[in-house]
Image (cartoon, rainbow, N blue to C red):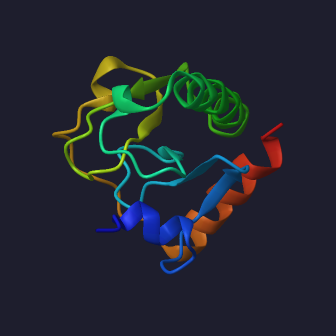
């Protein structure tokens, strides 16, 4: 059964995309912990990150690094943290979250509520810095 991420990849559900190539896509989390919270997803539908083929896994990590650099260039922060939880959607993905303190990436924190215009502006800024 297709996941919500598979539907986003197929264009059936809209997203605030920041980067994409043949194998991976990165888009803003719609329930972000911080402005610039991005999900990086392989286009192949695999539930568990460590079930990815070795080349897909390393490709995903390299793509995520490029996205993290774009986030750091776009959002004022000390670091971009990386998290893999893998329980909320049965499709491998990485959370990239701009942080200034360790508590900024606490998933029990209240999620931000941003307007469509705020999401669009953040996505455009990160996309412009993606290389």
Relative to residue 7, is residue 71 depicted above or below? Answer: above
**Residue 35 percent location from the top left of the image:** 49, 48
Q: Residue at x 69, y 50 (%)?
A: 19
Number of numbered tags placed on the structure image: 0
Quadrant in which the N terminus is drawn? bottom left
In this view, the residue farthest toward the front is 53
Q: Quadrant of residue 69?
A: top right
**Residue 43 percent location from the top left of the image:** 54, 52
Relative to residue 87, is residue 50 depicted above or below? Answer: above
**Residue 98 percent location from the top left of the image:** 50, 32
**Residue 84 percent location from the top left of the image:** 33, 30
Q: Residue at x 50, y 81 (%)?
A: 12
In this view, the residue farthest toward the left is 108
Relative placement, left or right, of 4 versus 103 is right
Q: Foreground: 115 or 62?
A: 62
Q: Residue at x 53, y 20 (%)?
A: 79
């Amino acid at each position: 059964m297709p996941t919500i991420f598979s539907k986003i990849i197929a264009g059936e559900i809209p997203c605030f995309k920041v980067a994409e190539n043949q194998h991976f896509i990165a888009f803003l989390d719609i329930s972000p912990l911080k402005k610039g919270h991005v999900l990086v997803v392989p286009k192949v539908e695999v539930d568990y990150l460590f079930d990815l083929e070795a080349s897909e896994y390393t490709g995903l990590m390299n793509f995520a690094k490029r996205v993290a650099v774009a986030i750091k260039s776009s959002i004022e922060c000390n670091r971009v943290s990386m998290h893999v939880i893998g329980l909320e959607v049965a499709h491998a993905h990485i959370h990239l979250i701009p942080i200034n303190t360790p508590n900024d990436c606490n998933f029990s924190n209240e999620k931000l509520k941003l307007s469509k215009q705020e999401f669009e502006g953040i996505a455009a800024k990160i996309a412009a810095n993606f290389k």
